[in-house]
Amino acid sequence: MKLDKFDLAILQALQQDARLSLQDLGKLVGLTASPCWTRVKRMEDAGIITGYTVQLSPEKLGLPETVILHVTLDNHSDEALFEFGRTLESIPEVLEAYLVSGDYDYFIRVAVEDTRGYERFLRERLYKIPGIRHSKSSFVLRRLKQSPLPVRLPP
């Protein structure tokens, strides 16, 4: 699907505030509500817009600590990778998980209440998953940047 400047403006605006009414969104991008709705619907149908979410405060919900976890598995078969990934999907503390290249197999971002909570997460959740050879943890001291996807016209 080819995107034009209006589509990109819509995407940028929705990444900033997905609660915008179609009227307000249209005003921001220079369209009326009806063509704005048509474009949003078209981008939803094409899978460009995959959903609408709310950003929550981890601190206010009792999960102020973020831990970056690198994991190496013993076995790299398709089945082992699939099973490990499937298990991670079921763990609520896991916010993001990536199969990566390099020294480790997985990059995992976890939200916990404190160091004791992280220890509990390791003992009760992560280390119960079979096949982990090695893990390395880093507590995030401060988030320096979190931003929406850059949206721009191709050259």
Image (tube, rainbow, N blue to C red):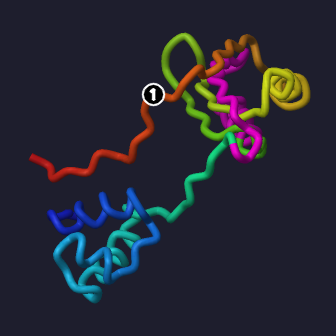
**Residue neighbourhood size for the residue with mark 1, other residues' Cα within 10 Å, grouped as few (<14), some (14–19), many (≥20):** few
Whether 141 is drawn above or below 66: the answer is above
Q: Is residue 128 left or right of residue 152?
A: right
Whether 105 is drawn above or below 79: the answer is above
Q: Is residue 58 left or right of residue 153?
A: right
Whether 53 is drawn above or below 132: the answer is below
Residue 98 percent coordinates (x, y): 56, 33
Residue 115 percent coordinates (x, y): 80, 21
Quarter the N terminus occupies = bottom left
Q: Closer to the camera, 137 or 56?
A: 56
- Please tell me in which quadrant of the rendered image residue 21 appears: bottom left
Q: Residue 8: within the magenta?
A: no
Write the start and end of the magenta stretch as one range. Answer: 60-88
- Please tell me in which quadrant of the rendered image residue 145 appears: top left
Residue that carries the numbered disc 1 in the rendered image: 144
Residue 132 percent coordinates (x, y): 76, 18
At a point 20% along the width and 63% down the height, the residue shown is 3
Q: Residue 61: within the magenta?
A: yes
- The number of numbered discs placed on residues in the rendered structure image is 1
Q: Closer to the camera, 19 or 39?
A: 19
